Amino acid sequence: MPLPRATGRADATANTDATAMAGTSSTIRLAELPANRRARILRLTPPAARPEWARLLADIGFEAGEPVQVLRRAAVGGDPIVVRIGASTFALRRAEADCVEVELAA
């Protein structure tokens, strides 16, 4: 969920959004998850040009509710990303990891 943009004015709507967001869990894309931070998969959202990626990721265990962790990234460009899901370890392209929406673990 993106943060509300600052408008430079005190706005009751912006304050309400910020208050509501403070009580909710943080969601980000797997591609943005810091190394060694644990998260749980919420959903897969492949790009329109690659709808088959959802099935391919699900086939190897990327399903809602599964715990996931980024182990490391390539030194140059951060692609691929080494990811652990359950007891399995995979190397994903950044574009593939960007399809996976996760909720940060507490």
Image (cartoon, rainbow, N blue to C red):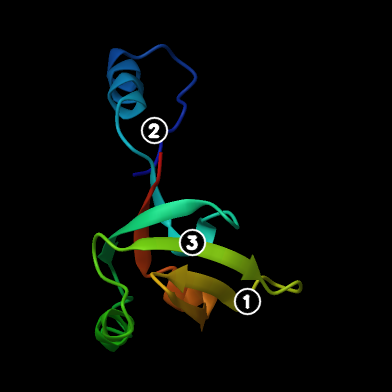
In the image, 36 versus 5, the foreground residue is 36
The residue tagged with tag 2: helix, strand or loop? loop
Looking at the picture, how far across and down is residue 92, in whole percent?
A: 50, 80
Quadrant that contains the C terminus = top left
Mark 2 to mark 3 CA distance (whole Å) = 27 Å
In the image, 14 versus 40, the foreground residue is 40
Q: Residue at x 34, y 16 (%)?
A: 15
- Residue that label 2 marks: 4
Looking at the picture, how far across and down is residue 17, in whole percent?
A: 30, 25
At label 1, the amino acid type is: Asp
Q: Residue at x 41, y 36 (%)?
A: 3
Label 2 Cα neighbours within 10 Å, binned few <14 / some 14-19 / many ≥20: few
Answer left or right for 7 relative to 72: left
**Among numbered discs 1 and 2, the one appearing first in the sequence:** 2
Mark 3 to mark 1 CA distance (whole Å) = 16 Å
Residue furthest front in the image:
87
Quadrant that contains the N terminus = top left
- Image position of 12 with respect to 103: above or below: above
Q: Which mark is residue 69?
A: 3
- Residue that label 1 marks: 79
- Image position of 57 with respect to 32: above or below: below
- Image position of 16 with respect to 55: above or below: above
Label 3 Cα neighbours within 10 Å, binned few <14 / some 14-19 / many ≥20: many
